[in-house]
Image (cartoon, rainbow, N blue to C red):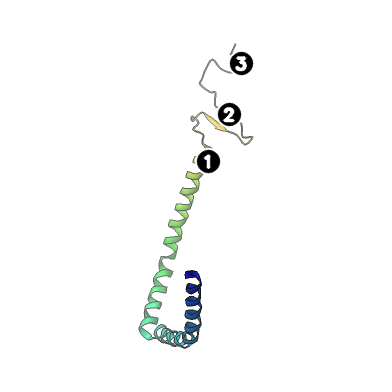
Amino acid sequence: MAKLSFLAGLAAGYVLGAKAGQKRYQQIKTQADRVWGSDPVQARVDTVKQAVKEQAPVVAAKLGDAAKSAGASAKERLTGEDLPETTHRGTDRRLHADTTGFGPGPGQLP
């Protein structure tokens, strides 16, 4: 019963609000358009537009640097390899080692 009375109240509120709502909506819209079109507001909008244009290259450069850093960090975390400087993955995705200066030399292993 409580659910039914809630739905009835909701429906009545919707109907009454819809009848009064259109007129009030038009009043609010007219006032908002008047404020937006006023000289002080438009002067401030122009000031903000100019500031955004001036700062856009700086922001773009910072975003680019942040994206590069995030990409490098993500790649490092995803590969999960902590290889020594003398070991690397080749284009064939196999591990390759720099053997110069280590051990007895090529061809001299038992």
Mark 1 Cα within 10 Å, few/some/many (few <14, many 20+)? Answer: few
Spatial CA distance of label 2 from label 3 is 17 Å
Q: In terms of depth relative to the viewer, which is nearer, 94 or 25?
A: 25
Could you tell which of marks 1 and 3 lies nearer the N-terminus? 1
Tell me residue 20's x, y (percent).
46, 86
Q: Amino acid at mark 1?
A: Leu
Q: In terms of depth relative to the viewer, which is nearer, 10 or 65?
A: 10
* Front of the two marks 2 and 1: 1
Could you tell which of marks 2 and 1 lies nearer the N-terminus? 1
Could you tell which of marks 2 and 3 lies nearer the N-terminus? 2
Q: Is residue 29 above or below residue 109?
A: below
Q: Are marks 1 and 3 in contact (CB under 8 Å)?
A: no
Q: In terms of depth relative to the viewer, which is nearer, 61 or 29?
A: 29
Tell me residue 1's x, y (percent).
49, 70
Mark 2, residue position: 96
* Front of the two marks 1 and 3: 1
Q: Residue at x 47, y 44 (%)?
A: 73
Mark carried by residue 78: 1
- Residue positioned most to the top: 110
Q: In terms of depth relative to the viewer, which is nearer, 8 or 13?
A: 8
Spatial CA distance of label 1 from label 3 is 36 Å
Circle 3 SS class? loop
Q: Residue at x 64, y 34 (%)?
A: 92
Spatial CA distance of label 2 from label 1 is 20 Å
Q: Residue at x 53, y 23 (%)?
A: 100
Mark carried by residue 107: 3
Q: Amino acid at mark 3?
A: Gly
